[in-house]
Amino acid sequence: MKRAAALALALLAPGAAMAQQRQQPPRQDDLAQQVERNMRTCMGNAQDTALAARCMDGQRAVVAPRLEHAVERLLATQQDPARRAALAEVQAAWVTYRDRRCDFAGTNPERGADAAADRAACLLQFDLGRTVEIERLLEPPPPPPARQQQRR
């Protein structure tokens, strides 16, 4: 079933596109590119949605700790306890939304057995996007543009 491989890669494409929207050129170790490569390796030429779901779950097992570490690092940058608590609330709300959204995707009766792959893709896409988002916040700001001297 070609649809399984296409589904897996299509559902991950927005996360990969988001990761590539950095102002800097993509690095070799870019997370989205790494996940996409690993998905292609895991899937090979197989057209099985159950395999696609397992491959996505495997990639999520790699991405999730990186996301957790990024969240911890971002929380550590917040010197004000109220701000740190607010950020923790934002992250908890994001997790709740992600889980509910992906559970909804994974229970679509019209998708039948493919719904499990939909849920796995949803979770991976959300985790990938959030990881990129938070890691971007942790990057140092770009240097200010060089001022040109005005000619008289």
Image: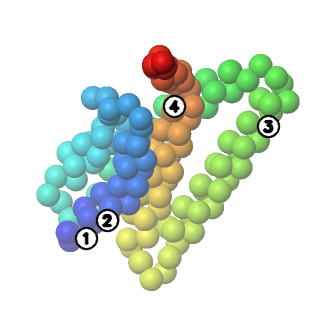
| Element type at mark 4 | helix
Mark 3 and mark 1 lie on one chain; the one further toward the N terminus is 1
| Element type at mark 3 | helix
> Mark 4 is on which residue type?
Glu
For marks 3 and 1, give the one nearer the viewer. Answer: 3
Cα–Cα span, label 2 and label 3:
36 Å
> Mark 1 is on which residue type?
Arg
Residue occupied by mark 2: 7
Residue occupied by mark 1: 3
Residue occupied by mark 3: 86
Do the residues under discs 2 and 4 have CB atoms within 8 angstroms? no
- Mark 4 packing: few (<14 Cα in 10 Å), some, or many (20+)? some
Cα–Cα span, label 3 and label 4:
18 Å
Mark 4 and mark 1 lie on one chain; the one further toward the N terminus is 1
Where is residue 146? Give x, y as percent. Answer: 46, 19
> Mark 3 is on which residue type?
Ala
**Relative side of 58 to 80, left or right:** left
| Element type at mark 1 | helix
Do the residues under discs 2 and 1 have CB atoms within 8 angstroms? yes
Mark 2 and mark 4 lie on one chain; the one further toward the N terminus is 2
Q: Residue at x 37, y 42 (%)?
A: 20
| Element type at mark 2 | helix
Residue 137 visible within the image? yes
For marks 2 and 4, give the one nearer the viewer. Answer: 4
